[in-house]
Image (tube, rainbow, N blue to C red):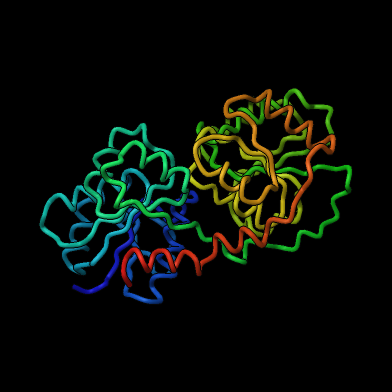
Amino acid sequence: MSKNIIFFTSTIKGGGAEKQLYALFDILRKKVECRYYVAKKTNSIDNVESFVKKRTFYSFFKLVKVILKFKPKYLITTLPTPNLINVLIKKLNLFKFESVVRIANHNLDLKTTKFIIKNADIVLFNSNENKALYTKQFINFQEKFYYVNNIISPSYSKSNKNNIPSEKTNALVVSRLVTNKGIDLLINAMNELSQENISIDIYGVGPEFDYLNDLSKNKNVKFINEFSSIEDIWSKYNLFILPSRKEGMSNSLLEAQYNNIFSIVSNCKTGNNEIIDLTNNGILFKTEDYKDLKLKILNYLNGQYESKKSKEIIGKNFSEKRAMSYISNILSI
């Protein structure tokens, strides 16, 4: 059988999971023939073909036709619905491909999780913490569990020599505006810090924009309703905040750390603890506790935390070379 690989997910313009799946595609297509498909309509992007469907699950039969035509060795997906489609097609027993699902978040509570884990051939994790939690829950399937690091491109690092006055704190958040990201916790904290010398720019789009904008009473909190060109803005900031209720392995946290930016992050499952333990360039606050987040921000403003250089250790542990080594061994290519 050929080593052809098909990649499939919902959209090319989603969050970190989609970005990282494309990064894997980008490195693997240098070694084997790869094709990349998304369910939903997207702008023209090289090497990406869209099925132009309104909902991801409506791509099922389109994907079956693609598999029938190209006869891949592997079908690699990420996110719950694409992963479910992956194993459902595998269950048809009409094809001989190996089902590879990538778990990019802590989704043990989803009803489809057990079915996906049971029927996939290979399960990839981007967080060792998440992998350990899944291993504890599904100990009989742990032999199919593997870790593959997220990839942080050197393009995400800009010179962090900036003109921010030492007494001024410019903070940023990079996040989808959805409940799991906990932006409301940060806004509640900032509503009680209106007199402090800190400004926060929140980069992101999502269904909670209007709600969060109305919730915010602090004139130093600004919403920038976009995601574009984030790699160009790191040098404007000296603090990164991630108040998530759950994560997988946050790309924005990795990028902040790659730019040596001190980070205040929740201790949610999963990934945040791993990164801060690795770099020691940040502090954790209790998930869901905006008062603790407020305290950590005040501590930072009062100089109680020391920023560390974290670029080198992030670059080493989340490199393209390391990811290629992991995935090549797993797929035997």
Quarter of the rendering containing residue 213: top right
So how many labels did they put on this image? 0
The image shows residue 297 at horizontal and vertical percentages of 75, 33
Residue at 54% across / 34% down in the picture? 268
Residue at 85% across / 43% down in the picture? 168
Decide if residue 222 is on the left or right side of residue 333. right
The image shows residue 244 at horizontal and vertical percentages of 56, 36
In the rendered image, the vertical position of residue 21 relative to residue 34, given as above or below: above
Quarter of the rendering containing residue 326: bottom left
Residue 40 visible in image: no
Residue at 77% across / 48% down in the picture? 307
Decide if residue 133 is on the left or right side of residue 92. right
The image shows residue 222 at horizontal and vertical percentages of 71, 38
The image shows residue 226 at horizontal and vertical percentages of 59, 48
Residue placed most toward the observer, 297 or 307: 307
Residue 232 visible in image: yes
In the rendered image, the vertical position of residue 189 relative to residue 273, given as above or below: above
In the rendered image, the vertical position of residue 299 relative to residue 331, given as above or below: above
Residue situated furthest bottom in the rendering: 31
Image quarter (top left, top right, bottom left or bottom right) of the C terminus: bottom left
Quarter of the rendering containing residue 139: top left
Image quarter (top left, top right, bottom left or bottom right) of the N terminus: bottom left
Decide if residue 278 is on the left or right side of residue 294. left
Residue at 57% across / 41% down in the picture? 273
Decide if residue 80 is on the left or right side of residue 277. left
